[in-house]
Amino acid sequence: VQLQASGGGLVQAGGSLRLSCVASRNIANSNVMGWYRQAPGKQRELVATIGSSGITDYADSVKGRFTVSRDNAKNTVYLQMNSLKPEDTAVYYCHFQQRGMNYWGKGTQVTVSS
């Protein structure tokens, strides 16, 4: 599975961005897609995931501000990020997991200025 992420950029604190990730194959069944991020000097961390059933999970740091969603017909997962903070600055990676296999997309940079 190849994953192509887009939508990153530079935004002021309090602003919004929407990330998109398109998978190279059908994502409708039995998988989990989501977003992770890695800030300079830090480990990669989970941001949000969504299963094929629609069940979501979020890091505590983004709850209430970020929303993960998916459109199976378009093989796409989204991350709507609102009320962005400087500490959200990181490279964001799309992730796809199915039957124990993990796939990663190339990251997209999100920079939030104060």
Image (cartoon, rainbow, N blue to C red):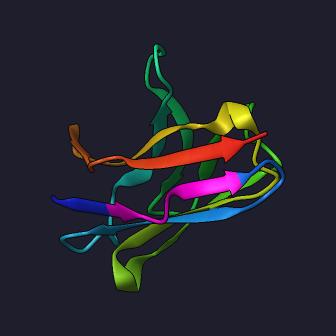
- Would you identify the image quadrant in which residue 4 lies? bottom left
In front of the other: 17 or 22: 17
Numbered marks: total: 0
Position of residue 48 in the picture relative to residue 21 (left or right): right
In front of the other: 12 or 51: 12
In front of the other: 16 or 58: 16
Residue drawn at x 36%, y 61% as measured from the top left: 5
Position of residue 74 in the picture relative to residue 88 (left or right): left
Quadrant of the image for the N terminus?
Answer: bottom left
Per the image, is 10 magenta? Answer: yes
- Is residue 45 among what the camera can see? yes
Residue 2 at x, y percent in the picture: 17, 60
Residue drawn at x 83%, y 49% as measured from the top left: 64
Chain part drawn in magenta? 5-11
Residue 112 at x, y percent in the picture: 67, 44
Residue drawn at x 54%, y 48% as measured from the top left: 110
Residue 13 at x, y percent in the picture: 80, 47
Per the image, is 6 magenta? Answer: yes
Q: Is residue 88 above or below residue 14?
A: above
Residue 42 at x, y percent in the picture: 48, 15
From the image, give the main secondary structure of the stretch colored magenta: strand
In front of the other: 40 or 69: 40
- Is residue 59 among what the camera can see? no
Residue drawn at x 82%, y 52% as measured from the top left: 83
Quadrant of the image for the C terminus?
Answer: top right
Furthest residue in direction bottom, as rendered: 73
